[in-house]
Image (tube, grey):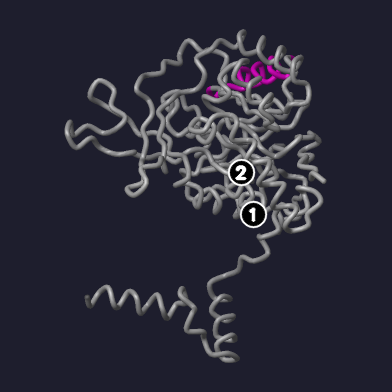
Amino acid sequence: MSKDLSIVVNGLKFENPFVIGSGPPGTNKATILKAFKEGWGGVVAKTCSLDASKVHNVAPRYGKLYSRETKEVIGFQNIELISDRSIEDWIKDFKEIKAECPKGILIASIMEEYDKAAWQKLVILCQEAGVDAFELNFSCPHGLPERKMGAAMGENPEIVAEVTKWVTEVATIPVWAKMTPNVTDVNVPAMRAIGSGAHGISLINTILAVIGVDLDTLRPLPTVKGYSTYGGYSAQAVRPIALRHASKLAKALKDASMNNISISGMGGVEKSSDAIEFMLLGSHTVQSCTGPMLQGYKMVHELKAGLEAFMEKHNFTNVSDFVGHSLQYFTTHAHLNELKQGKFEAKEISKDAQWSGENIDKQTNDLATN
């Protein structure tokens, strides 16, 4: 018997927890409909704004980091901006998408300048077009900082709180705030967004990075007419960092008994095991953007099959049964040491314990002397 992969998040029923993250895979009606028809539970559309005439993308705008051994892509960098399509085109697309795929959860990613009227106008337009939820882009690391948009806004908790409040004053549907990892503690702006009415938090957006330097031309990559800029780093290499941020927020929400706040985790999700890790660490939905860019929309089939097999193996009936399950196993370093000391007093360490602290110390000493 097949498992029920659906999950209700902020009152919205996702047929499965897998969501296309905001970016090229959700750049217009055609791509979004393709994602829904392949079976994705939700799509966050590419970020839109009121005035797309100020958005000018360049090419090339992508860079890849390859594994030295297998040559597979392990890191991906982009310097792509938000959508350059007009808000009129987006409103038309939103209406038609919901008419054709009413069960697919369509989330509008929105970004504006520090202007209350602009944010609220954008919210009302998208809401009237029938989108199911909003994701506030406080996190694009390289997009339009000169206009104080994206991460330039998300790095300031006071502004995050204020803008979220502007949105929630007029929004009648769920609002998620998307966090940048390019701060000391993601929980600080996240909690300010929640305090201003956000129903959920999406994290993480890409990490500001340099993908590399061309050793023939001596130019940083990606190179546009001889020059480059810092860009957003994604793909499997960032997953451990994303898992830390998502789990840290999930633990804080749990400790504060804020069980009504959802988390949409992302960062390096390329297969079902990646997504399941996010859910075990507190994510109700899991987004992927670079994954479908590299593999195509059909990657959702493996995500669903892998999730179903995992639930069958562990006898979980519903997806919500295991969201956050692994959070209970985090503790402090001091507690780990206490556990270790107690264990070793009772039982001699096995010679097969390859990764004990003693063995790591011995391996380090061997390397230093050889």
What is the distance, in whole Å, between disc 1 and disc 2 at their CAs? 9 Å
Q: Where is mark 2, residue-wise?
A: 265
- SS label for mark 2: strand
Amino acid type at circle 1 is Leu
Question: Residue 211: which disc?
Answer: none
Residue under the point 31% across and 29% down: 222
Amino acid type at circle 2 is Gly
Examine the rendering and report whether any part of residue 166 can be seen.
no
> In the rendering, at what x and y percent does residue 321 appear?
78, 53
Residue 319 falls left or right of residue 19: right
| Residue 237 in the image: above or below residue 91 | below
Quadrant of the frame with the C terminus: bottom left
Q: State the extent of the magenta-drawn residues as a range.
A: 113-128
| In the image, farthest residue toward the front | 1
Q: Where is mark 1, residue-wise?
A: 281
> In the rendering, at what x and y percent does residue 214 appear?
23, 35
In primary-sequence order, the first of circles 1 and 2 is 2
Q: CB under 8 Å between callouts 1 and 2?
A: yes
| Residue 284 in the image: above or below residue 64 | below
